[in-house]
Amino acid sequence: MPRRVHFRGELLKNAQFRPEPILGRIVIDKVVVNDEVFLSPPVRSDTASFVSLLNEKEIYDNTLLIPFPYTEHDAEAFIRLADLRSKAYRRPLDWAIRTTAGRLIGMVSYHGASQFDSSREEVGYWIGKPYWNKGIMTSVLQTFVQLGFVTYGFERLELPIFCTNAASKRVAEKAGFHLHSSIPKAHIKDGRPIDVDLYLILKA
């Protein structure tokens, strides 16, 4: 059974932000995950960090849409897209994971499924290889779940993961997601079919 999360009236227990609804728009500048990392939208000055971290074949192999090799043009195009998506959905969907010094070390996003069903959303993420196995992504994902349920009003979050990506599945499980189903040949990548495990978490 997918886990149901109870909040007991708290507003993002581990995060601090300034929600300001303006004509239906949610304005959030920053989400503090813990003493080590925070979230904020990506900006043009992050370009070099994107290029440095995403020229890593293991990240490419475990994600669907990140190109390889990764160029400055790719980074700039993604940053522009993130800004356009934020305006179109009237809330930020794409969040840079940052150290306390502000350095981008990864990304976590809502994919926009709520366009078709406002109660559900799909989540995706990556984090740079130097930051693997440090518990960072688990903490980020836990906070991102709270952001989605408490602030954005989602009832169901879905997390599709390549069946071969055991590390990402461990992160999902530690963050409270549970395996819902396995989808054979869900995607085609480099001419090969990719099987996906779909993880879920539900708001109580």
Image: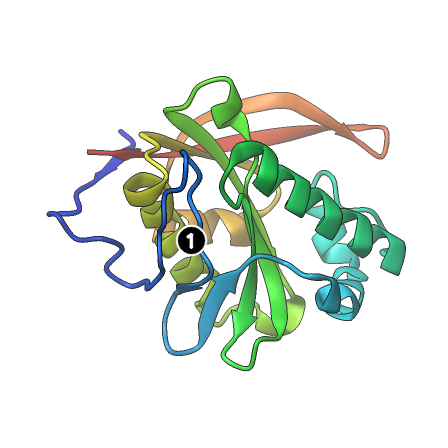
Decide which of 53, 178 is in the foreground and name it: 53
Pointer 1 local density, CA inside 10 Å: few below 14, some 14–19, many at least 20: many
Q: Is residue 136 above or below residue 156?
A: below
Decide which of 121, 201 is in the foreground and name it: 121
Looking at the rendered structure, the secondary structure element under dot 1 is helix
Q: Is residue 82 above or below residue 36?
A: above
Looking at the rendered image, the quarter that the N terminus falls into is top left
Looking at the image, residue 176 sits to the left or right of residue 158; the answer is left
Kindly give the residue lying farthest to the front in the view shown.
Answer: 23
Decide which of 85, 131 is in the foreground and name it: 85
Look at the image and name its color scheme. rainbow
Looking at the image, residue 107 sits to the left or right of residue 153; the answer is right
Q: Residue sitting at 64 percent across and 23 percent down?
A: 186
Q: Residue sitting at 49 percent across and 62 percent down?
A: 39
> Residue 2, image x and y in percent?
29, 32
Q: Is residue 132 above or below residue 112?
A: below
Q: Can residue 163 be seen in this view?
A: no
Kindly identify the amino acid type of the residue bearing the numbered disc 1: Leu
> Residue 180, image x and y in percent?
40, 27
> Residue 153, image x and y in percent?
32, 34
Q: Can residue 61 be seen in this view?
A: yes
Q: Is residue 183 above or below residue 57?
A: above
Decide which of 153, 123 is in the foreground and name it: 153
> Residue 113, image x and y in percent?
52, 26
Q: Residue sitting at 23 percent across and 60 percent down?
A: 13
Q: Label 1, on which residue?
A: 141
Kindly give the residue lying farthest to the left in the view shown.
Answer: 8
